[in-house]
Image (cartoon, rainbow, N blue to C red):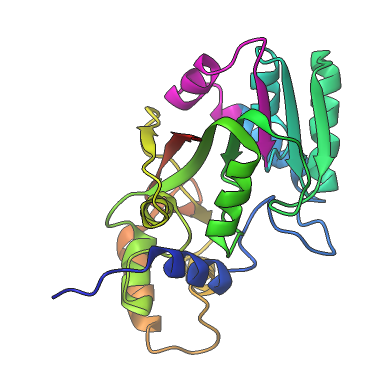
Amino acid sequence: MEKITDWIKLWRQLVEARPHSHGPSVPGDRDAWRDRARKYHQRVVERWSQPDSSRDFLLSQVDSDTTVLDIGAGTGSWTLLLARQAGHVTAVDPSPAMLEVLQENVAEAGLQNVSVVQGAWPEAQVEPHDLTLCAHAMYGAADLPRFIETLMAATRRRCCLLMRAPVPGGVMAIAAQRVWGQPHDSPNFVICYNALLQMGLFPNVLMENTGVWGAWTNDSLESAFQEIKGKLGLEGPSEHDQFLRGLLAERLTYRDGAYVWPPSMRSALVYWDVA
């Protein structure tokens, strides 16, 4: 009989294997976003130039009486979107650089119904809100049950998680299968959804209708090779080096002066009501 996967344990293992790779939810002495918060915001603006089902759905869940908690708010794209329709939005993020851009964006939009809390979840202290959103800011939380339970304790009505959903057979999936014996190279929707089931939660799922996204680029195959080794925690020469070089040579395409990875991600919105 096939061994049953402990999804909560797998999530923790992947977080701890890649502590350098996480985004705005990672606490630390140095602000990891200090030099790139504005570029990050510009990329979000560009990606949001097209409509998507996650934004439409979340806007349908709020009105002028709704309070929203935005965990890992970053530069405030979700905060601004929801604050234009909600009664109040509280934005939580540990990065001063991210929050600086967020506050500039809030001021430029003329919004008066946004509060800002600097802190990492689940340590940040906030009052309960009607709806809680965490968009791609949970990947650095090794203790997923604590992250979720604290999130639920701060929610009166509905919890929403937006996560990357890897495409089966992607480059990183093949590499992870070879090196780690399972196809997940990082925390993602598949692991989190099964972990929620393991916790006794049965969430709904809405897949974004924007299709597959996320094409990385490298200046050379060698830099791509070093990147994939770093993502898999391989230091120095490895028994997997030849396989990984061959995989990259086969799957990456050279275009406009760069080596382009095939698109490998979709985005999934997971949501459930708090009893």
Instruction: Please say whether residue 65 is visible from this viewpoint.
Output: yes
Q: Nearer the viewer, residue 233 or 63?
A: 63
In the rendered view, would you say 271 is above or below 17? above
Q: Which quarter of the figure has residue 252?
A: bottom left
Residue at 31% across, 68% down: 5
Q: Give x and y (percent) for residue 39.
A: 72, 40
In the rendered view, would you say 173 is above or below 268? below
Side of 45 where 176 appears, left or right: left
Q: Give x and y (percent) for residue 18.
A: 57, 69
Identify the magenta region. 46-71
- Count of numbered marks: 0
Instruction: Please say whether residue 249 is visible from this viewpoint.
Output: no
Q: Nearer the viewer, residue 61 or 230?
A: 61
Quadrant into which the N terminus falls = bottom left
Q: Which quarter of the figure has residue 240?
A: bottom left
Q: Extreme left residue here?
A: 1
Q: Nearer the viewer, residue 118 or 201?
A: 201
Q: Give x and y (percent) for residue 153.
A: 62, 43
Q: Is residue 50 magenta?
A: yes
In the rendered view, would you say 208 is above or below 198? above
Q: Give x and y (percent) for residue 118.
A: 83, 45
Residue at 37% across, 78% down: 179
In the rendered view, would you say 236 is above or below 9? below
Residue at 78% across, 50% down: 94
Q: Is residue 193 magenta?
A: no
Side of 131 where 228 appears, left or right: left
Q: Extreme front residue here?
A: 275
